[in-house]
Structure formats: C-alpha cells, structure tokens
Amino acid sequence: MSDVVNDTRPDLAIVTGTSSGIGAAIAKTLRATGLDVVGISRSAADETTLQVDLADLAALRTALEPIVAERRVRTVVHSAALQVLGAAGTVSTADWLASLQVNVVAMDVIVGLATPGLRAARGSVVAVSSVHGTATSNAIAVYASTKGAMEAWVRAAALDLGPEITVNAVAPGATDTPMLWAHLDPAGPEAARLVERTPVQRVADPQEVADLVAFLVSDKARFITGSVLRIDGGALARLGTE
C-alpha cells in the first residue's frame, strides 16, 4: 500500500455507467478537475473504460483488483443503473437479482476494493440515486426499491467509512438521458405533462448532475456525509395529490 500512497500520478476516480448520460458527464467533469478517471460500462467507449457487466460481480472484481493495487483511488461514483419496468409482483426473480446487483451490490464491491486508497486520500463516494428512491409511480417497483436500498447503503456506509471517507448520494429527477427517452416520447403528451409538473418547467441536463457530484467529491464538501441531495427541479416539493 505504501507504493500506492507514494504514487506521484494524479489520484484515480472510478465512475460507472460512463458510456452515456449522467455517467459520461461525470467522467468528463472529474477529468477536468485533474483526476484520472477509469470508467466502467457494458460497452467500452475508449481505452480508459473497462467493459464489464456489473451484474457479473466476479468479473467486476477481476477487472478492478489490479487497478486498485496499483493506483490510489480518491473517488468512486456509481452512476450505472438497470431500470426494469413492471408492477410489484410481476417482475421475474432474475430481473430482481440483476437490478440489485447492478444498482446496489456492485457499488459495495467497488467501494470495498477501493477503501484503502479512499482512506489514504481522504476521498469520497457518491451514488447516483433517483427521485424514485423517495416517491415513485406505477410499474417501476424494482427500480424504486433498488434506489431506496442505495440511499440506505449511503447512510450506513457514511458511518462505517468515516471519518476519512465521505459518502453521499444525489437524487436526480427527470434528466435528458437515453434512459429517460427509452420509455418516453419526447414529443408526446406524457413528456409535456412531466415538464409542466416540474416547477422549473424542464428536465435536467446531465451536466447539472455532474457539477453537483464534482462539488460533493471536492474539499468544499468535507462536512457533508450520509446525505441525499435532490436535484429534481422541485419535483418532490409538489404534493402527489395536488
């Protein structure tokens, strides 16, 4: 570990889900702050990205172990997510388990491997949750459950990993990403209603979420841990019965 601590190269950030959307914006933003970034994605985008299916936890360990042995990890950001649609009681066990592995367990595995470096660097962990961790809608029971579990993990990990490591989550509302538009016609009435019912009258830009993550992993946020910061345009401020 002493060789890693004395490494003169920039500290490392591990970011999942970097092929597009929020994860891609986070990786670009953290690189701009001076961190080296190793991305993790099912579809490798470039030489700095590991092509790993996060549902395969053994493959994840195999890919990351040599990296964390060689480099000091300062930041872990878990942005990858599997969004399976279906009402409670209708989703297959296989889809439940894959969602839990990708959305929650993979984050725990990555942080476990990176903990020595994170402690040495007094680093930070950020989980990209969702408004669905607090309030949800029909036919998205699995995704909502995993985001709720993710936020509970953040609270527990903040206690376990402090004082050296801060652990937080951001909870975006509707964001301009392929995941949103895969299930929603941007020109359709549902998208218009979503915008209308969001107090700021638009969806988020992925860069806005990335900027919040960059703040949370900076020294300016050292007194913030165990928190979930909403970035939802005010969506959760509205009564669901209104």
Image (cartoon, rainbow, N blue to C red):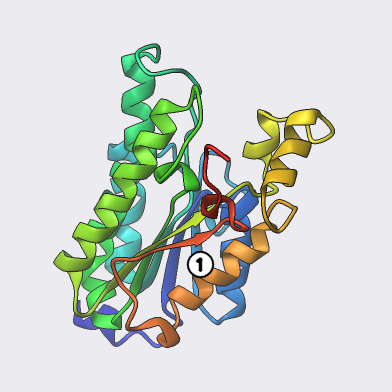
Q: Quadrant of residue 232?
A: bottom right
Report which residue position mark 1 lands on: 37
The amino acid type of the residue labelled 1 equals: Val
Q: Name the residue nearer the viewer: 214 or 14.
A: 214
> Which quadrant is the C terminus positioned in?
top right
Task: Look at the picture and state if 183 lies above or below 79.
Answer: above
Q: Residue at x 33, y 48 (%)?
A: 150
Instruction: State the SS at label 1.
Output: strand
Q: Name the residue nearer the viewer: 13 or 169.
A: 169
Does 6 sit left or right of 80 as displayed?
left
Q: Is residue 42 visible?
A: yes
The percent position of residue 172, horizontal first and vertical second, equals 54, 54
The percent position of residue 163, horizontal first and vertical second, equals 19, 79
Q: Quadrant of residue 121?
A: bottom left
Q: Is residue 71 visible?
A: no
Q: Residue at x 40, y 46 (%)?
A: 134
Does 107 sit left or right of 47 as displayed?
left
Task: Look at the picture and state if 126 lies above or below 41.
Answer: below
Q: Quadrant of residue 26?
A: bottom right
Residue farthest toward the front in the current orientation of the protein: 242
The percent position of residue 66, horizontal first and vertical second, equals 31, 59
The percent position of residue 80, horizontal first and vertical second, equals 48, 46
